[in-house]
Image: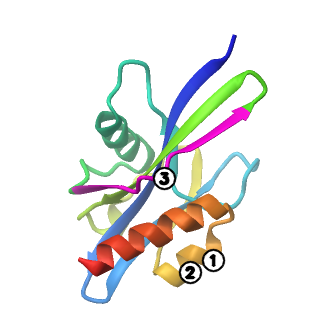
Amino acid sequence: MTDLQHRIRLFVYRMSAAGPSYLLLRRSDGVNPTWGPIDGPIQFHEQIETAIRREVREDVGLPDPQGLVDLKMPKHWELGDEQVIEWPYGVQIMAPAESLILDSRWSESRWTGFSETYTQLCLELDRAAVTRLHTLITAA
């Protein structure tokens, strides 16, 4: 029997006069010491928007996002008898950068501009997602 899981990948950003900056996080478990977005499961009977609010609050201690951008790039992959669908979203927040309260699964955080964000992300799908997000929010 195959187990199907839905997960979210959240690219948190803030807007300023200088343009958008993006939140990068590093895991504290040492398994994956690279920089990346918030990620987490969508729990059974949970709407995507509810999962996004929960993950932002639990992972970085920020209040509800001000804006959600569906990047329309779901990724489906299989690992043994497990199927995973990941849903990437852009999440705009208005809180100051210093107001982050990291969950214990994250060891570090930093806000970076697009160029640095792009080069720090190790997964090609994450780079494609942040590129789409950057294009959508700067074109408006």
Is mark 1 in CB contact (under 8 Å) with mark 2? yes
Do the numbered discs 3 and 2 sit on residues whose CB atoms are within 8 Å?
no
For the residue marked with disc 3, what is the amino acid? Met
Q: Label 2 amino acid?
A: Glu
Residue 60 x %, y %: 41, 51
| Disc 1 to disc 3, C-alpha distance | 20 Å
State the image coordinates of residue 83 (x, y, percent, origin top left): 64, 28
**In the rendering, at what x and y percent does residue 108 appear?**
57, 61
Label 1 SS? helix
Callout 2 secondary element? helix
Q: Which residue is mark 1?
A: 119
Front of the two marks 1 and 3: 3
Side of 13 relative to 109 (left or right): left
Q: Gap in Å between the C-alphas at discs 3 and 2?
A: 22 Å
Dot 1 crowding, Cα within 10 Å, few <14, some 14–19, many 20+: few
Vertical position of residue 61 compared to residue 130: above or below: above
Please give the label number shown on residue 116: 2
- Mark 3, other Cα within 10 Å: few <14 / some 14–19 / many ≥20: some
Callout count: 3
Give yes or no for residue 71 being in the magenta stretch. yes
Q: Which residue is mark 3?
A: 73
Q: Which residues are magenta?
A: 67-78
User: Chief secondary structure of the magenta span?
Assistant: strand
User: Horizontally, is 114 left or right of 5 in the view?
Assistant: left
